[in-house]
């Protein structure tokens, strides 16, 4: 197990040694994030100092691939020095690696920083995204809470006010219905919960009610409390019943329909804000809005994204990786990541007027994530090894509910049964 005593001294000694011989650390991320975010940040970090060189391993296909590669690396002692793990998969990974002494407790490294450093850079709610069993195993790098994108031109044509996007589900569905009525080639909206590659949008339907997916220990289903699971299925079904969402159109075609100006409202991550704007290319008045909650007082939105973790046991490399993580999750790193993608910045300093503050004021389309900072909640992960199968089985049930093949009550009960059965394997 990693020793957490005299952390500041260890870092100082390690960095002193690094001044004599450059320390090279290898990190792992996904292919989709490498070119757009990590390579420019890596280059900037490598140029700004002479003690550490950061390189990246061949990228993983997606978050699931990162997860599997880290487990394999753990078994074969071939882990990278740092990696970017999805929030919902961090708990199972951190517990397994901690048992083998293969992951650093970043809380000890944070304690070695100057007084007030943590408070100046990170909120407790943001840091919670990287905590497992009370330990800070990850530093949030990318964070996203779902938001609405909408075509303000279609909203106007439908008689709506693009400056006052609806704040209730009833209002959103009503507006989508009016947009659908504009013509046979116009779709009202897309909320493709039954097609998503993971359960993020399903968790949205639970948390926005004030519910939670699992208990604190992460081993007991809680999304069936207070009929939250039934209410979620009723809402999903209502989108199809109202004629505003067509589940027979696949996700790729839904996005194309929206970006060519033939769909009014589209739900997705702010991570796609830049690429969505590029695809629209000024063809219509593209805007974004905070997502809808049925419980404004207690509702949250699960935070997608990833946390940086340290998976080396070499003290020199731990110190070097920590310096890199502080940079990419610091004000400069987060300003860059937010501007290049649309992600919610995880660092408070990045919101300063001279960084993103003025930028968001001048570009309200990109400011929506910062307006949902207080809504960022946990993206829960199931214990065991069956998370992917749990979701595959669950989304088939959700689709059946949306198509009217199962009642919301029947479907909701099946969702619970699937999770409770498979999470024990």
Image: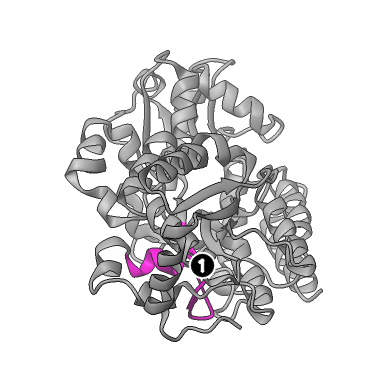
Residue name at image x 72 percent, y 51 percent = 65
* Residue hosting label 1: 316
Highlighted range, magenta: 123-140
Could you classify mark 1 by the number of other residues whose Cα lies within 10 Å: few (under 14), some (14-19), or many (20 or more)?
many
Q: Relative to 42, is 351 on the left or the right?
A: left
Classify 244 as above or below 141.
Answer: above
Residue name at image x 33 percent, y 55 percent = 347
Q: Nearer the viewer, residue 44 or 130?
A: 44
Classify 91 as above or below 349.
Answer: below
Location of the N terminus (image quadrant): bottom right
Q: Nearer the viewer, residue 133 or 1?
A: 1
Query: Is residue 364 at all visible to an observer of this figure?
Result: yes
Residue 174 horizontal/vertical position (percent):
44, 36
Disc count in the image?
1
Residue 46 position by quadrant? top left
Location of the C terminus (image quadrant): bottom right
């Amino acid at each position: 197990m990693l020793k957490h005593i005299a952390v500041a001294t260890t870092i100082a000694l390690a960095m002193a040694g690094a001044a004599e011989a450059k320390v090279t650390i290898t990190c792992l991320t996904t292919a989709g994030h490498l070119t757009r975010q990590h390579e420019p940040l890596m280059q900037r970090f490598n140029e700004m100092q002479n003690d550490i060189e950061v390189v990246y391993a061949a990228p993983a296909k997606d978050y699931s691939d990162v997860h599997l590669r880290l487990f394999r690396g753990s078994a074969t002692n071939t882990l990278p020095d740092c990696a970017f793990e999805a929030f919902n998969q961090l708990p199972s990974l951190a517990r397994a690696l901690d048992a083998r002494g293969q992951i650093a407790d970043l809380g000890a490294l944070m304690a070695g920083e100057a007084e007030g450093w943590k408070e100046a850079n990170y909120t407790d709610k943001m840091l919670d995204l990287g905590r497992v069993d009370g330990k800070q195993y990850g530093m949030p790098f990318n964070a996203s809470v779902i938001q609405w994108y909408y075509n303000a031109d279609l909203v106007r044509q439908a008689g709506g006010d693009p400056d006052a996007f609806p704040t209730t589900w009833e209002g959103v569905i009503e507006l989508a219905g009016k947009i659908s009525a504009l013509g046979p080639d116009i779709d009202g909206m897309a909320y493709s919960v039954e097609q998503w590659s993971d359960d993020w949008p399903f968790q949205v339907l639970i948390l926005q009610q004030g519910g939670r997916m699992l208990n604190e220990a992460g081993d007991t289903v809680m999304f069936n409390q207070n009929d939250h699971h039934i209410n979620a299925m009723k809402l999903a079904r209502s989108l199809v019943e109202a004629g505003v969402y067509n589940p027979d159109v696949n996700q790729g075609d839904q996005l194309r329909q929206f970006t060519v100006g033939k769909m009014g409202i589209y739900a997705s991550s702010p991570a796609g804000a830049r690429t969505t704007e590029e695809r629209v290319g000024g063809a219509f008045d593209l805007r974004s809005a905070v997502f809808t909650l049925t419980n404004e007082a207690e509702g949250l939105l699960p935070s997608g994204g990833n946390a940086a973790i340290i998976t080396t046991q070499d003290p020199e490399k731990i110190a070097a990786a920590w310096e890199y993580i502080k940079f990419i999750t610091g004000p400069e790193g987060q300003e860059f990541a937010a501007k290049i993608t649309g992600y919610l910045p995880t660092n408070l300093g990045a919101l300063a007027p001279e960084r993103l503050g003025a930028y968001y004021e001048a570009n309200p389309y990109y400011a929506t994530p910062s307006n949902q900072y207080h809504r960022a909640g946990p993206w829960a992960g199931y214990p065991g090894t069956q998370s992917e199968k749990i979701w595959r089985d669950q989304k088939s049930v959700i689709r059946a509910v949306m198509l009217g093949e199962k009642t919301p009550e029947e479907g909701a009960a099946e969702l619970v049964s699937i999770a409770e059965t498979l999470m024990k394997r």
